[in-house]
Image (cartoon, coloured by chain):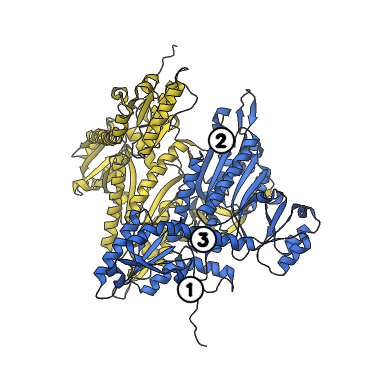
Chain colours: A blue, B yellow
Amino acid sequence: MSKKKPRTAITPTRADNFPEWYQQVIRAADMAENSPVRGCMIIKPYGFALWENMQRIFDGMIKDAGVRNAYFPLLIPLEFITREAEHVEGFAKECAVVTHHRLEQGDNGLEPAGKLEQPYVIRPTSETIIGDAMARWIQSYRDLPMKLNQWCNVMRWEMRTRMFLRTSEFLWQEGHNAFETAEEAQADSRKMLEAYRVFAEDYLALPVITGEKTADERFPGAVATYTIEAMMQDGKALQAGTSHDLGQNFAKSIGIKFQGRDGDERLAYTTSWGISTRLIGGMIMAHGDDDGMIMPPRVAPEQVVIIPMVKDDNEAVVMDFARKAADALKAKGLRVLLDEREMRTPDKMWDAIKKGVPVRMEIGGREAEAGQVTSVRRDLGRASKTTQPLEEFVGSVEAMLDTMHDDMLAAAKSKRDAAIKDVETLEEVEAFFKDDNIGFVRIDVSVLDLPDYGRVLKDYSLTPRCIPFADGGQKVLIAKAY
Amino acid sequence: MSKKKPRTAITPTRADNFPEWYQQVIRAADMAENSPVRGCMIIKPYGFALWENMQRIFDGMIKDAGVRNAYFPLLIPLEFITREAEHVEGFAKECAVVTHHRLEQGDNGLEPAGKLEQPYVIRPTSETIIGDAMARWIQSYRDLPMKLNQWCNVMRWEMRTRMFLRTSEFLWQEGHNAFETAEEAQADSRKMLEAYRVFAEDYLALPVITGEKTADERFPGAVATYTIEAMMQDGKALQAGTSHDLGQNFAKSIGIKFQGRDGDERLAYTTSWGISTRLIGGMIMAHGDDDGMIMPPRVAPEQVVIIPMVKDDNEAVVMDFARKAADALKAKGLRVLLDEREMRTPDKMWDAIKKGVPVRMEIGGREAEAGQVTSVRRDLGRASKTTQPLEEFVGSVEAMLDTMHDDMLAAAKSKRDAAIKDVETLEEVEAFFKDDNIGFVRIDVSVLDLPDYGRVLKDYSLTPRCIPFADGGQKVLIAKAY
């Protein structure tokens, strides 16, 4: 058999095998890998730098919204998590349980010892333990609203895991707010959802549809769950962030009470809202191509990579100019990598391509002598190759990154919108997925009450993604989902 | 009995009962509280904002040193932690053990179910799991040095806990570096210790003594442990950060091998280094006074608090001027709180004092009309009260904060140095602590070999804090410690 050089940097391609392409992009971009701990991943430096940028931006957004960060215990007493009946029902099947507090030498090596009187679960989410603190901290209406957030790890013992998208342990932020009235809580849960939409679209270039989950898909214990839903390039949906109006359900079971303006004791209304490292998976599947990742410029770990192309006789000239270019870009506040590794130039170029660095700059002897740089936009590839004076490039690179962001968002949006099909009947829903069409169907919400609705969902592994706000609550989107 | 108004904001005072004073400062400054989870604390927003500032600064320092952040699993397979014999010996007695992965309804309510074939421990530290990844990632000398860090939670099941100082769960950074040679690893562990010294002194105003731990006090599995030791106001020592030269011990047990420059396979040399939320306890006990916390200006959650003193007829004038002052300070990049709460002015003032806000600014009708502000430095109190034009204050506030930092560091250093006693004999050590003297003793290292050394340590609950670098390895500091 002859070995043919693959035309793409990633094998298989998206068209050949999307799930496997996804795994290969993560590996090729050096973002993460599976760990020896069941269902848990290691987030490697390049992937973690992306998460840090996302954290920094969203953290600023929530602080501007008056939210304060805090930190609550990792472990939740069993008794706490059972307080809210629907809540425990929702999480009991996937809790990591701590039952002992030391190890002792036994017959077969070290064994758990020091059995705890009451076991703890590792937080799958923290409504109960944060609610318990709020019950102590909130005395009067003057203490409201109370808006708290934590950036932390959580654990849900998933049976089938997939890097970033569904792992037993993941990183997230969980916001927990409390209010005097039902109206405020509802408005707040919508407001935080809007913050997610802005974050996804304006920073991750990830277009999302905002809407409400159907009753079956609500967070366990919520009165309403709002969601941002994104479409991946294989037409599947990804729930990219959720915001829950918990009404008085948790306040009642946990006892979050306050003295109202009239002196009467009342129950608070609470909300909770979260986004996670799952968003990274969403970005890969929305933006990546058959050569690897394409990083949205505003969160890219490196926004510009400079590849010096050195020959024996020009190393000093090229490297001096490359450093000058790097310094000029850093002075503008850009994240720049000057790739000085001992490695062949084509390998460096392909590494930058696979990692999805937004702008690749090549500097050879000719460029260095002419004071020019050659740049290529990752999303447009070699068609966008431009050679220009360094000063001109430095002066225009921010606009270039903004344009790239806008182009990525627009491309993802038009791809998505073209793959949403409006249908009238459940038969059309069935036909759409039977024929392996790619995308979502949009249909009148009355479909939820049809006798065959559940069967069609089951037969084609579909879920109702949301009732989009844009359609005035009259339509529901149905799709396969991650 | 007549009730006397206490002279200090904190009861008891430091002199009356230092440990209880410490707890009361944490409560009065609203920094943290005990949680319903055994041995775990809740870090409240004001305390967490301090940690965020510390993280941001130290994270910048380690990135400048070429360290890259990543994230490794919370759970460590039992088999991993047993690989390094001394290491497991050191941590086995205090491990939280995960044995089940779901909850099921039993006779007495929900019970652990889904027993794991192999239990996991919640990381007490991550040498073994990060080392396992390094063993995969490091192939050749070209992959070295490898410098990784994670900011995360860890768990050690402590029997006696104290907020910030010793809790079952705490937050920290753990750095893990790998090198080609023993010399590089040793130099690196010293370099990271020096980074801790700079961070403690230049940002937390916490003077520290750098040195090496005696063999008995080493990290389990290390060939050398370096430490920064601080003195609290009650004369006890606080280990404020440690950096370990692990030699080839972990590389050998985990298999971190690489192909050397000569083509031969070699074992890497590794280091690990960590600081934690414990530093917050150290700052409280080194800087606080009988009126509460005194925040080091460079990490203070709020550097300036503005307290508007409004009367019925001047609210608009005062508030307009207060906002103008706040904006002018924020424009300089300072962290400013304009205290607009509905609360009596003296209560606001005492709140700012107890929280240790470095500079308190008071703006009343007279000030607003004259365009002036009255400011008080927290560490100097009312003696430092100054009234001056707003512009003048804004122009000088950064220098004022720098001076306050320098003064706090100098005050803590002179207090500490006065409480270190040089002695010649073990009898003098015994006499020092028998007489309840406050502080450390410094004595020739040959004391470590005396037959009565162990007994004296035990009788007076002492430990050797370190062999200070400053004394050329010839002396050892002995003290009571947190």
Point 56% across, 61% down: residue: A412
Q: Specify the amino acid type for callout 2.
A: Met
Which quarter of the figure has residue B207? Answer: top left
Lower sequence index among marks 2 and 1:
1
Q: Position of residue B162 (x, y in %)?
A: 43, 37
- The reply to whether residue A120 is visible in this rendering is no
Using the image, tell me which numbered label, if any, was put on residue A134.
Answer: 2
Q: Which residue is mark 1?
A: A9
Q: Residues within 10 Å of mark 1 (few under 14, many from 20)?
A: some
Distance of mark 3 from mark 1, alpha carbons?
23 Å
| Depth check, front residue: A156 or A376 | A376
Q: Position of residue B316 (x, y in %)?
A: 46, 23
Q: Residues within 10 Å of mark 2 (few under 14, many from 20)?
A: many
Does mark 3 fall on the same chain as mark 2?
yes
| Depth check, front residue: B187 or A363 | A363
Q: Specify the amino acid type for callout 1.
A: Ala
Point 21% across, 49% down: residue: B473
Q: Is residue A103 above or below residue A76?
A: below
Q: Position of residue A172 (x, y in %)?
A: 52, 50
